[in-house]
Structures are given as C-alpha cells and as structure tokens.
Amino acid sequence: MKPTGSTEVCHDDKDAIIHVDCVSHRYPDGTQGIHNMCFSVYPREIVALCGPNGAGKSTLIEHLNGLMMPDIGGVRVFGEDICKDNLSKVRRLVGLVFQDADSQLFSPTVLEDVMFGPLNLGLSQEEARDRAERALDVVGITDMDRIPHNLSGGQKRLVAIAGVLAMQPRILAVDEPTGDLDPSNARKMELLLASLRDDHGLSVVIALHDMDMAARIADRVCIVKQGGIIAEGTPKDILYNEALLASAGLELPTVARIFKGLGLENEGVELPLTVKQLLHLLEKDGLLRPGDRVRNDE
Ligand SMILES: Nc1ncnc2c1ncn2[C@@H]1O[C@H](COP(=O)(O)OP(=O)(O)O)[C@@H](O)[C@H]1O
Ligand SMILES: [Mg+2]
C-alpha cells in the first residue's frame, strides 16, 4: 500500500539503502502479516515504525534482513534484492534486535555471546574479541563474564545490540526496544540509539507504539496499520495529526497534547516535540507568569 496523505520528508528513492517493494507475507496459519507493504530506509536516519499491536511492525522488521522472505514483492538492500545467495552478506549489513532478547542470547558468557557473530564471519579469536569488547563498550556493558541468562531484560537487550554491532552493520532494526525498561534505562537506550546514528553513522529502524519516544528520537515516522504503511513524514507532520493517529489506534505524544491543550497550535510557532522544546516555547512566549521559573534541564 502506498502511503496516502503522506507528508514530505525530502528523500530521493534512489538514496534508499533498504527498499521494501510492495511486500506481502502470510503466515503458515493463513494470517496476513503484512500486505502490499512499501517502506524505505535512508542513510543515517532514525525511522520509527509506529502502530498498534498486530499492525505488522515485527513482520516488516524481520523482512529487512531476509529472516522472513516475501510471498509477493521484494526487498532490496544496498541495491541488491535479498535472495538465498546473498543472505549472509545482507545479515552483516542489517542487524536485527528482537523484542525478546532472550531468544538472541545463547552463549555461556556475555563476551562469548558477542564474539559469536564475528567468529562466524571467520575472524580470529583476537579480532573477534576486539570487536566484541568495542561493541560492549558502545552499549556500556562492562561485566563481560556474566551469564547472559541471569541479566535483567534491559541488560539482555544491550548485549543483544552489542552482538549485532560486533558485526559492524550499516542498519540496525530494533523491535520495541524500551517496552520492558524502567524510565532511566529507557532513556539510556534512546541515547544509545541516537548515538549509533550520530557517532557511528548507522541507520536505525525502531518499531514502537510509545509516541513520546517517537517524538523525541525519530527523524521520520511511518504509521503502520493492518499490514501496511498508511502515512509517513516528519515527526512534526505526523505526530500532531490527531485524526491520523486515532485512525491507527494511536495517541498524540504528551507534548503535542499539552501544546494543543494550551491552544497554541495556530500561533505560528514551531511545533515542539520534546519537553525541553515545549518549556522553551512557553518561556519565550511569556505564557508563564513573570517571575515563574521553568525547570528546563531535561
Ligand atoms: N507466527 C505467527 N503466526 C501467525 N500469525 C502471526 C505470527 N506472527 C504474527 N502474526 C500475525 O501477523 C500480524 C502482524 O503481526 P506483527 O508483525 O507481530 O505485529 P506488530 O509487531 O505490529 O505487533 C498480526 O495479525 C499477528 O497476529
Ligand atoms: Mg511486534
């Protein structure tokens, strides 16, 4: 399905590093996972796939590295159609982190787990260890001798991300990365994902239904509904469109709700996406009483 009512984010199709071309996939029990799905990923962006449970986000993500193959349509990664012959190359380029990190960890120690991929690529023990240590450093895991099974949900996901980063991918796709994290670890995860884009040049695809997180982190937002993308655009265009979000069973981000609630939408000011931006605006526009101080240290 081509997104209808989509708003402009200036991307040229030829720049796409992943292109999902009208893909349909039906599960063996007959359930349609995605239908006529079109989706692209561009260099060095964070793209949020927002949709309610069962919309098709995970099914789409699993098509990005050939873990699932389309029944109809095709997926191109750096210009090559994914097929049996290039699967290992595609999986080096596109790393997936599942919602259930448990399913991704299987070695006796954290270090061995993260070394597994590089060793599988044929690297020496020394090279694999070096890559694993660097990847664990990026995600901030220092205790490499722990048994993955005993880690907390958030730590497991960080180790799973390190395992993927050790393969030096160009694209990371993460499925609901903060669902089971406490607010402080969720914030760390957000910072990590932003730093993978900013400091490591990766493109990051995130499936989520936390609209606040999408507002804080995404460069582009795609709304997924019933197996297709019904709209895509900049966070400001999509995340202030209450009717669109409601039609997909989603809600406005908190900042947008407050902004609209204050009746500021038609004031011709820049739409805020973060609490910091909102507070800045309130302060600047004099909506607070003189002398009020805003805590703007987010
Ligand atoms: N293993 C499976 N077998 C059958 N149907 C599935 C399976 N996994 C997902 N589905 C169905 O495919 C559709 C899309 O699911 P999914 O991609 O998991 O959505 P989301 O990740 O957005 O919650 C839903 O109708 C879901 O019930
Ligand atoms: Mg899912």
Image (tube, rainbow, N blue to C red):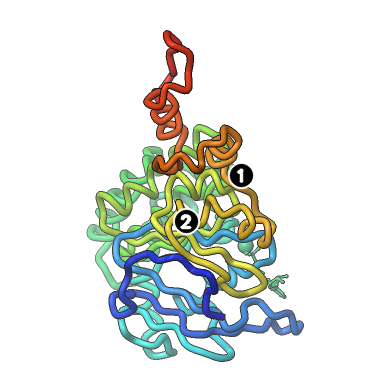
What amino acid is at disc 1?
Answer: Asp
80 and 235: which one is in front? 235
Residue at left 28%, top 75%? 15
- Where residue 260 sits: x, y (%)? 57, 40
As helix, strand or loop, the secondary structure at mark 2 comes to helix
Residue at left 34%, top 59%? 45
Label 1: few (<14), some (14–19) or many (≥20) C-alpha neighbours in 10 Å: some
Quarter occupied by residue 93: bottom left
Can residue 245 be seen?
A: yes
Q: Is 163 rendered above or below residue 90?
A: above
Residue at left 48%, top 13%? 289
Q: Residue 180: give its label.
A: 1
Residue 144 lies left or right of residue 53; in this view the side is left
- Where residue 282 sits: x, y (%)? 44, 27
Q: Is 246 rendered above or below residue 31?
A: above
What amino acid is at disc 2?
Answer: Asp
Q: CA distance from mark 1 to mark 2?
A: 28 Å
* Residue sticking out furthest to the top: 291
- Where residue 259 sits: x, y (%)? 53, 37
Nearest to viewer (mark 1 / mark 2): 2
- Where residue 134 sits: x, y (%)? 28, 49
Residue 48 lies left or right of residue 225; in this view the side is left
Q: Residue 7: give its label.
A: none
Mark toward the start of the polypeptide (1 vs 2): 1
Label 2: few (<14), some (14–19) or many (≥20) C-alpha neighbours in 10 Å: some
93 and 245: which one is in front? 245
Q: Quadrant of ligand 2?
A: bottom right
Q: Is 234 rendered above or below residue 140?
A: below
Q: Which residue is mark 2?
A: 237
